[in-house]
Amino acid sequence: MRLNIKDIYSWVELRFLRFQFLRFVIVGGSATVIDFSLLIFLTEVISLHYLLSATISFICANIFNFYFSKKWTFQNTSSRYIRQYMMFVLVGGAGLVINNYILYFSVENLRIHYILGKVIATAVVMNWNFFMNKYITFGKI
């Protein structure tokens, strides 16, 4: 089998994308721990409504996520922090709407526990966030 430069480039690009996704999972996993911990604390200990708790915890995790996504996951060196943060907030805001809709639907319509609903919502929003932030917030678009 003969490899040409295009094949090698594609292989390197794929490996980089996998490594970048791994960093995204680590940062996102840490943000998820923050998100779930605050959600449970605010709901169970402070007795806030689960959707209010989910909103507060999501915002806190999103701020953490922005900093580490910019610096480590996407290794973005652009000095356009305000533009990027505004895009990150828009992506995160859309993610919050998706998150809370899935959570509400899971609890109110499917009658499942809010933690399980949050797990489902997190899986969906994680994919949304990765691709939107990679190609729009921190991309060259």
Image (tube, rainbow, N blue to C red):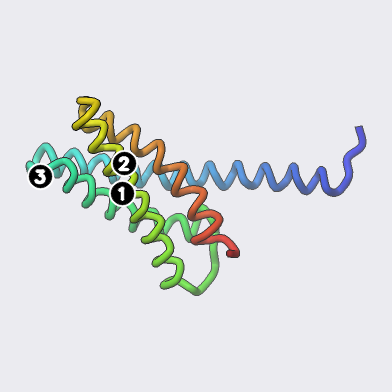
Alpha carbons under labels 2 and 3: distance apart: 19 Å
Instruction: Say which residue label 2 marks.
Output: 33
Coordinates of residue 74 in the picture (x, y in percent): 54, 56
Instruction: Say which residue label 3 marks.
Output: 48
Asked which secondary structure carries label 3, the reply is: loop
Q: Which mark is residue 55?
A: none
Q: Is residue 8 left or right of residue 68?
A: right
Q: Residue at x 9, y 40 (%)?
A: 45
Q: Amino acid at mark 3?
A: Leu
The mark that comes first in sequence, 1 or 2, is 2
Q: Nearer the viewer, mark 2 or mark 3?
A: 3
Q: Residue at x 78, y 48 (%)?
A: 9
Q: Which mark is residue 97?
A: 1
Q: Amino acid at mark 2?
A: Val
User: Which quarter of the image is occupied by the C terminus?
Assistant: bottom right
Q: Amino acid at mark 1?
A: Val
Coordinates of residue 49 in the picture (x, y in percent): 12, 43
Asked which secondary structure carries label 1, the reply is: helix
Q: Residue at x 41, y 60 (%)?
A: 88
Q: Is residue 86 left or right of residue 23?
A: left
Vertical position of residue 78 compared to residue 67: above or below: below
Q: Quadrant of residue 47?
A: top left
Alpha carbons under labels 1 and 3: distance apart: 19 Å
* Circle 3 crowding by C-alpha within 10 Å: few under 14, some 14–19, many from 20: some
